Image: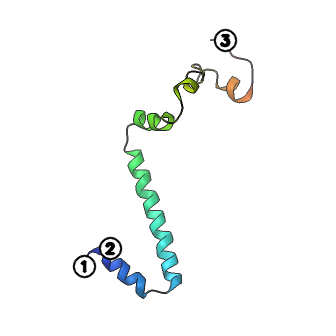
Amino acid sequence: MTIKEQLIHEIEKSPDIVIEEVFDFLLLVKLKYHRQQEQSKPFGSFIQELVSDIPPDILATLPTDGSEQHDHYIYGTPKREL
């Protein structure tokens, strides 16, 4: 019997309150697992995934000096002389 089959067997015998606890734990472990998988990706791949749904014409309108002038873009302050 596989571990999955054993787990299903135990779930079938357990009261609902225990099943709710196990379910919450399972979701927590899955979240932790997915975060670990994401962290193992190279940063460049992560960024490419983030912007992959943004149309190229929209990307072209984004500022190229966002890191130097972040106060201007976030708070509306005048741009700094660089």
- For disc 3, the neighbor class at 10 Å (few under 14, some 14 to 19, many from 20) is few
> Quadrant location of residue 41?
top left
Decide: is 27 above or below 49.
Answer: below
The residue shown at (38%, 83%) is: 10
The quadrant of the image that shows the N terminus is bottom left
Q: CA distance from mark 2 to mark 3?
A: 62 Å
The residue shown at (60%, 21%) is: 63
Closest to the observer: 56 or 50?
A: 56
- For disc 2, the neighbor class at 10 Å (few under 14, some 14 to 19, many from 20) is few
- For disc 1, the neighbor class at 10 Å (few under 14, some 14 to 19, many from 20) is few
Q: Say whether marks 2 and 3 touch (CB < 8 Å).
A: no
Decide: is 59 above or below 1.
Answer: above
**Secondary element at tag 1:** loop
**Colour setting:** rainbow
Q: Amino acid at mark 3?
A: Glu
Q: Amino acid at mark 2?
A: Lys
Q: CA distance from mark 1 to mark 2?
A: 8 Å
Percent across and percent down for residue 54 are 54, 33
Q: Describe residue 79's horizontal placement relative to residue 26 as left or right.
A: right
Q: Say whether marks 1 and 2 touch (CB < 8 Å).
A: no
**Secondary element at tag 2:** helix
Closest to the observer: 69 or 64?
A: 64
The quadrant of the image that shows the C terminus is top right
Q: Which mark is residue 81?
A: 3
Which of discs 1 and 3 lies nearer the camera? The answer is 1
Percent across and percent down for residue 39 are 41, 45
Question: Earlier along the polypeptide chain: callout 2 or callout 3?
Answer: 2
Task: Read off the residue under disc 1.
Answer: 1
**Secondary element at tag 3:** loop
Q: Which mark is residue 4?
A: 2
Closest to the observer: 30 or 4?
A: 4
The residue shown at (43%, 63%) is: 29
